[in-house]
Image (cartoon, rainbow, N blue to C red):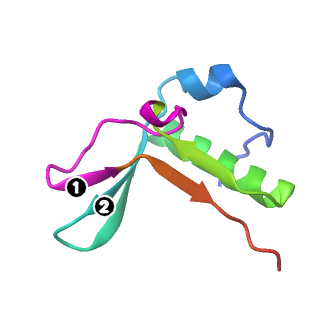
Amino acid sequence: MPNVEIRPLSLLEKTCMNNAFVSFEFNVDQDCIEIHFNAEGRDKLFQHFRTALEAHDHQHLMTSEWGGGELSSEKQGNSNRLINHVKIIPWRE
C-alpha cells in the first residue's frame, strides 16, 4: 500500500481531485457493485479509508451533482446505475 498522508481533504481537493477517477456503479445484470478507478483515485480512496479509521468517524464520497466531488459522474458500464453517494463507516474493534 502506498504511503499516503492522512488528513481531511480540503474543499479545493474535493472539487479538483486532479486526475483522480473513482466511480461506484451498481451492475444490474450481475447484481453487484463495481468500483472503477485509476491510480490517483486509488490513492484518494486509501486516504478516505485511513481518515475514517483514524478519526473513528464516517466519510462521505459523492459526485459533484450531490455536493461532493470525490466520485466521478461518468458512468463506465452501459447498463450500470451510477451511485452518487458512498458512505465509508469504520467499525471499532
Q: In the structure shown, which secondary structural element does the residue marked by tag 1 occupy? A: strand
Residue 46 belongs to the span the image colors magenta:
no
Report the residue marked by disc 1: 80
Relative to 40, is 54 above or below?
Answer: below
Which mark sits nearer the N-terminus, 2 or 1? 2
Task: Please name whichever residue, 13 or 20, is drawn nearer the observer in this view of the structure.
Answer: 13
Quick check: 73 above or below 56? above
Q: Quadrant of the N terminus?
A: bottom right
Quadrant of the image occupied by residue 55 = bottom right
Q: Which residue is mark 2?
A: 26
Label 2 with label 1: CB-CB less than 8 Å: yes
Q: Position of residue 62 (x, y in %)?
A: 51, 42
**Amino acid type of the residue tagged 2 in the rendering:** Phe
Q: Amino acid at mark 1?
A: Asn
Q: Which residues are magenta?
A: 65-82
Q: Position of residue 26 (x, y in %)?
A: 31, 61
Question: Position of 47 compared to 43: left or right?
Answer: right
Real-space CA distance between mark 2 and mark 1, rounded to the nearest whole angstrom? 5 Å
